[in-house]
Amino acid sequence: MAEVLMIDAAVIFDMDGLLINSEPFWHRAEVEVFNALEVPLHESMCNQTMGLRCDEVVSYWYARFPWTGTSQSEVAERIINRVSELVATLGQPMPGAVETIQLCQQMHLPLGLATSSPICLIDVVLNKLNLQDTFDVISSAQTEEFGKPHPAVYLTTANRLGVHPQKCVAFEDSIRGIISAKAASMRCIAVPALEEREDPRFAML
């Protein structure tokens, strides 16, 4: 929180696992959908693709366990629809997330959202958290040629905010997200899940 008070430009938030407790929903949806295709995915394997776009997650597992009869785009759609259902019924804000956003608003800081999730899921999350009119700019990596850890979605968000990337600070919970923000020349505040906090890769900050 002290670092937020030092910011003099813009703040950009990730969404999944940072604003809302959706990472378990992604894991659950991926296991359900992939298992139905006879892909031997179990929950502990889902961390391998944390932070990737859904289409990239599907491509990742297709390369390892190719299936037939269902297109990769249809599989991605099934996963996103299932996550949307779970968010709408079970989603809860992450501790301190809404309060941090409110603090930034009180400081009149421009706010951006830069997520790997598609727009349809962004809408579900923001409605669930009552944050529909909170962000000045909302960007989805689904519209970029490359998703995180590529910096494209963060650079796009900064550009649309009209703020130089070096004047932005990002909040991220995943290693790929941190790499994305740092590659965009932004400062980054990591908020990893409890079980991830001993990961030495967070030392890149």
Image: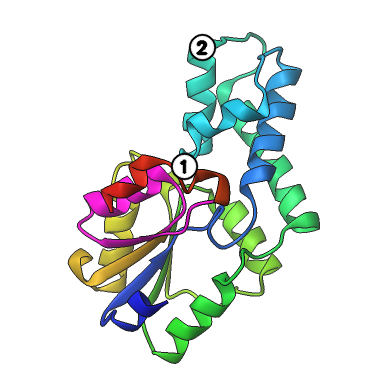
Which residue is the site of mark 1? 51
Q: Residue at x 70, y 66 (%)?
A: 128
Residue 36, percent across and down?
76, 19
Above or below — where is 173 with respect to 170?
Answer: above
Instruction: Reply yes or no: does residue 174 show up in magenta.
Output: yes
Count neighbours of disc 2 (C-alpha within 10 A) and say few if under 14, some if 14 to 19, many if 20 or more.
few
Tag 2: amino acid:
Arg
Residue 10 visible at all = yes
Q: Residue at x 63, y 8 (%)?
A: 68
Q: Residue at x 35, y 63 (%)?
A: 170
Res. 34 image quadrant: top right
Q: Assign a secondary structure to mark 1.
A: loop
Tag 1: amino acid:
Gly
Which residue is the site of mark 2? 64
* Mark-to-mark CA distance, 2 and 1: 19 Å
Q: Is residue 28 left or right of residue 89?
A: left
Q: Residue at x 67, y 11 (%)?
A: 69
Q: Earlier in the sequence, mark 2 or mark 1?
A: 1
The residue nearer to you, when weighing 171 against 123, is 171
